[in-house]
Image: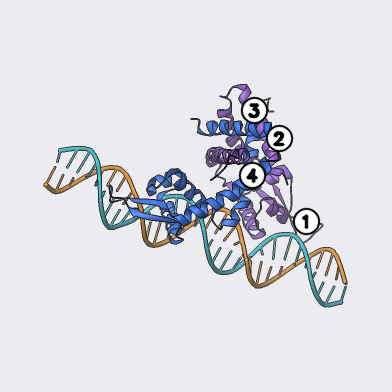
Chain colours: A purple, B blue, C cyan, D orange
Amino acid sequence: MSRYDPALEVADALHSACIRILRRVRTADEETGLSAPKLSALSVLVFGGPMNLTRLARAEQVTSPTMSKLVGDLEAEGLVAKRADREDKRGVRIEVTAKGKALFDAGRRARLTLLRGKLAKLPKEEREKLRAAAALMLRVAAAD
Amino acid sequence: MSRYDPALEVADALHSACIRILRRVRTADEETGLSAPKLSALSVLVFGGPMNLTRLARAEQVTSPTMSKLVGDLEAEGLVAKRADREDKRGVRIEVTAKGKALFDAGRRARLTLLRGKLAKLPKEEREKLRAAAALMLRVAAAD
DNA sequence: TCTAATAATTAGTTTGACTAACTAATTAAG
DNA sequence: CTTAATTAGTTAGTCAAACTAATTATTAGA
């Protein structure tokens, strides 16, 4: 039988809450026509700047063949561009195009606007509690 | 240029925080050999009790053929059992087997133990802030 | 200078999602 | 009480996105 364990209870509650929030927010992704992996890879490139395939694959926690295909598809859609890396001729430098940036911004905006709409209905104190909690959650996720 | 918008800022912070928490927690799933969809479907059955396929598919927000295949696979692995519904001969009653329950508990324990370990290091007040935030997040996710 | 390691791709497989089309059973209408 | 419409579930076929194994090109080290 399970004894009273506050940390476990909070883990359970937080786990469920994150799942439900993301499930809800992702309904906004349809508008852009971008799949979750594409939107996510684009995000890494937008915030991390141009990078080679291996680094992008690691950031997204997928293998290089998976990322190679994904980047190929993004390239075919004109959302990213591949350039030769002058320092290492084996490598490619992947960068977001203007079109890619615009579409990413639209997708991100759609997600955040949906969530923002719900948060705007909360009293200010509760919203501030969530702001503080988000900061805590980042620390928890990053902890060794 | 974007004006100061507290709700949007919190939306952004919360969005990122949920993504990172789940990404971290899911590393624990490898141990069970159960995929995320299987673990999730099992979860609905464990907490919601036996139910028919349509209800399970709705709970998981997938179509009935998708759930039909998933349940078929779980059945082949001996984790769920299908019984005829006596009240409605079109329907099947899907229930978790003892083996399924045990494996689900192990998977759930692995996820929560990982997160619990990180939460246990926080001071009590911060953990309680997260508990309150989780409750708020559920409300936000469920809001119209 | 070879040889080992690294960057990216190609080929082929698996899983989990979808739609379309079907059978069987139930419910509603005339 | 038939017939029409709906609902439950399955099967078949397609697609995206993940994987491993193998290949090519290039770099770097003993």
Mark 3 vs mark 4: in front? 4
- Which amino acid type is marked by label 2? Pro
Say which of A138 and A32 sits in front. Answer: A138
Distance of label 1 from label 2 (alpha carbons): 48 Å
The quarter of the rendered structure image containing the N terminus of chain B is: top right
Question: Which chain is disc 1 placed on?
Answer: A
Find numbered disc 1 in the image and state the secondary structure of the residue it sits on.
Answer: loop
Mark 3 vs mark 1: in front? 3
Residue occupying the point 61% across, 33% down: B131
Mark closest to the chain's N terminus, 3 or 1: 1
Find numbered disc 3 in the image and state the secondary structure of the residue it sits on.
Answer: helix
Distance of label 2 from label 3 (alpha carbons): 16 Å
Q: Is residue D1 left or right of residue D14?
A: left
Residue B138: image tag: none
Q: Is residue A129 visible?
A: yes
Question: Which chain is disc 3 placed on?
Answer: A
Mark 2 vs mark 3: in front? 2
Question: Which chain is disc 4 placed on?
Answer: B
- Which amino acid type is marked by label 1? Asp
Answer above or below: position of A88 versus A141: below
The local crowd at label 1, few if under 14, some if 14 to 19, many if 20 or more residues have their Cα within 10 Å, is: some
Question: Which chain is disc 2 placed on?
Answer: B
The residue under label 2 is B123
Distance of label 4 from label 2 (alpha carbons): 15 Å
Q: Are marks 1 and 4 on the same chain?
A: no
The residue under label 4 is B115
Mark 1 vs mark 2: in front? 2
Residue A85: image tag: 1
